[in-house]
Image (cartoon, grey):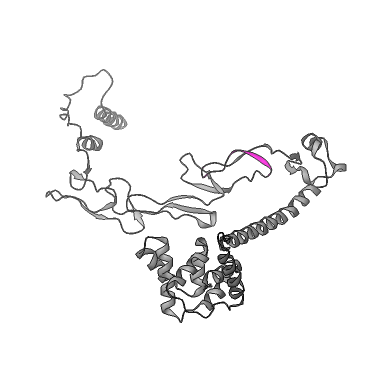
Amino acid sequence: MKRADAAAAWVLLAALWLAAGGAPGWPRGPAAPSPSPQPPRPRRHAAWAACATGTRWSETAGRCCAECPAGTFLRSPCTRAGNDSVCEPCPAGTFHAWPNTAPECQACYECDRHAFQSVLSNCSATSNVVCSCEPGRFRDCVDERCSDFACRQCRPCAGRLVQRPCSATQDALCGSCKPDFYAEGGECRPCRTHLAETCGEECQRACGGRRGSGLEYILLALSGPLFLGALAIYHKRLRLQQDAGACSPPPATPARGRPESQALLRRCAPERDARPAPAATPLQGSRLYAVIDAVPLRRWKEFVRVLGLRDTEIDVVEVEFAHVRDQQYEMLKRWCQQSSASLDPVFTALERMELAGCAEALRLRLQDCT
């Protein structure tokens, strides 16, 4: 009985061993036919390579779809039915710089005012905002493209020669001390502020022949305003002298010839001096030309303004009349028409303009010796 059970167990083990593949080298049954090889599936980049310029492969549509141009975004992609992409402009505050198939635009960057950044160019639908630094600062870039930067204060170069000025992209480059400056403690100090007893080796080398307490600079600062004041007084006196010379009456020509003319001049002179000045005489006819001849040409506009003629009237006359003497006559005539014109305001205006010599010359011209 035991032998029968052992034999059955050996038979079962042999069956299991055969089912597992048998011993190496033993013949096996016919192999199952292998399936036929499948063609490789096309890669995505191959489909992209087949798309024309300005289009892009769409997995959803299974074909090449047109890209949205810069400044727009893809509202809805193309479909298998042949409908093309639908693009819409970027809203305010967003942009797209390149053709795209993005479902939305990128948000514009904002310049950091607290970091002393300023707007170099505003954001548009096709470009982001361009930031720079405020005047007196330069960009300290964080990366190679300088997409992120900090604004640093430019180096002042106080008392030093500037080898390279500060710009938006780089700091200033300072050189050696300027003339009349000497180096001390990493700074350049002016020679005029040092004391002779505390002047060191560098100070003596740079300021050796210029020691002093700075008294010459004080005297120069005080003499400047005095010189300018004297120059102004000189020019004022020179102008008054020129006005007086322009207003002086022509020199009297001595009478020559018969004794009767000499007697007439002697008799006429006392009468002319004794007659009162025709101040209340109204302005008309030849008296207008007498006033014109008495006033210097370069101060004529000032004269009529002091009389009371408006600037609009002066401008109109200058446009209507080309000759200067005609302009003067017309201005004076219009002033006479606007007021009860007489010689009193004329003499008053000349006195206010400090043209007393012109007023006296006018009185002499208006006197008649008859």
Is residue 181 depicted above or below 254 in this figure?
above
* Spot occupied by residue 150 in the image (x, y as percentages of width and height): 54, 48
Residue drawn where x is 20% and y is 48% of the image: 60
Instruction: Give the residues drawn in magenta, as a range.
Output: 158-169
> Do we see residue 313 in this rendering?
yes
Any magenta on residue 163?
yes
Q: Is residue 282 left or right of residue 77?
A: right
* Spot occupied by residue 133 in the image (x, y as percentages of width and height): 51, 50
Residue drawn where x is 54% and y is 41% of the image: 170
Q: Nearer the viewer, residue 299 or 333?
A: 333
Q: Nearer the viewer, residue 282 or 50?
A: 282
* Residue furthest out toward the right: 197
Residue 59, quarter of the rendered image: top left
Indicate the quadrant containing the N terminus: top left, top right, bottom left or bottom right.
top left
* Spot occupied by residue 206 in the image (x, y as percentages of width and height): 77, 36
Residue drawn where x is 72% and y is 56% of the image: 226
* Residue furthest out toward the front: 259
